[in-house]
Image (spheres, rainbow, N blue to C red):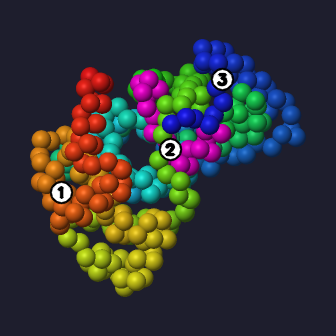
Amino acid sequence: MQSKFLKQPGSTNIFVILYGILNSFRKLSNNSPNIPLKPLIQKLPIDSSSSFVARTYTTPNFETPWHQHIEYELVLENGGDGTVFVGDYIGEYHVGDVFLLGKNLPHWFRKWEGDMISSAVVVQFQEEIFSGNFSSLPEMQLIRALMTKASQGILLKGDLKQKIGALLLQIESLTGFPQMAALLDCLHQISISDEISFLTNSPIINFSKLDQGRIHLVFEYSMQNFQRPIRVEEVAALTNKSVSAFCHYFKKSTKKSYIGFLTEIRMAHACKLLTSTDMSVTEICYESGFQNWSNFSAHFANHFHISPLKYRKRQTELQNINE
């Protein structure tokens, strides 16, 4: 997918440039009483030596429900595999995957097996660290554009994924300016690359804690039971709503019908089985929660514009190339 960001020279000199920019900005801010300095409302577990959080979360601290928060987030998955929900996107995540998530973008990384040990390096930062005169500098133009695009959720690919993953493995052990420079270098490299995929186009909705809890309950119930027939009535009962009220609520919250959401979960599971097992396509059909072949085949063609057998062949060829 071609990036809409303008190509710029490589990031070789970014540390030298940013060192001068930050020093100039600090001097200007300290010497001019007319420049308003916004106080940063701290909700992150940070200390006085840092303006953002970089840490590794490992089971049981890895497991969080479907949620949203005001911080931007860079995530490197470095242990375990599972299903990722970002806005209205449903897909897989694997070790080495890197995501950039915008502020208030709902997300959930759900590991496939309950006893799996999962781990991720997570960098969280608020947009206030790039506010004021610093954000308006021409050197920050592409990063500003990237922050806007992050509302769609971004998945890194290829060499970019490897480069940013390596930086994120180091960033937790850095402090002070080197840590800030590493974060800016990550964002700069992403902003000039076309090795990215956007995950969702749905508008961001601010959910109350009650709504976050309700939707997570529906998501988790669906993930635990999608391999059998699920009636909308039983899911609606989880939220203490009538069927019609629940369907309206779910569509308003996720921008898709519950049946459409359930079908996407089943499709994602079918893709996992097609690429990771030798099960027959018929077995995969029923193992993924579909009740008959024709229904499965029609949904698969509608989602991927290809048959399950051709999908398996294509993915196998891609895996062989990567190896």
Q: Quadrant of residue 249?
A: bottom left
Give the residue at mark 1.
Answer: 285
What residue is at 56 percent from the left and 44 percent from the top?
Answer: 150
Quadrant where the image shows the C terminus: top left
Crowd tier of the residue under label 1, counting other residues whose Cα lies within 10 Å: few below 14, some 14–19, many 20 or above: many
Q: Which mark is residue 8?
A: 3
Amino acid type at circle 3 is Gln
Tell me which numbered mark, 3 or 2, is placed earlier along the sequence.
Answer: 3
Label 1's element? helix
State if disc 2 and disc 1 touch (CB < 8 Å): no
Where residue 61 sits: x, y (%)? 32, 46
Going by the numbered disc 1, the residue's amino acid type is Cys
| Image: 63 above or below 294 | above
Amino acid at circle 2: Phe
Q: Nearer the viewer, residue 118 or 295?
A: 295
How many marks overall? 3
Q: Secondary structure at mark 3?
A: loop
Disc sitting over residue 198 in the figure: 2
- By secondary structure, the bulk of the magenta-drawn segment is best described as helix
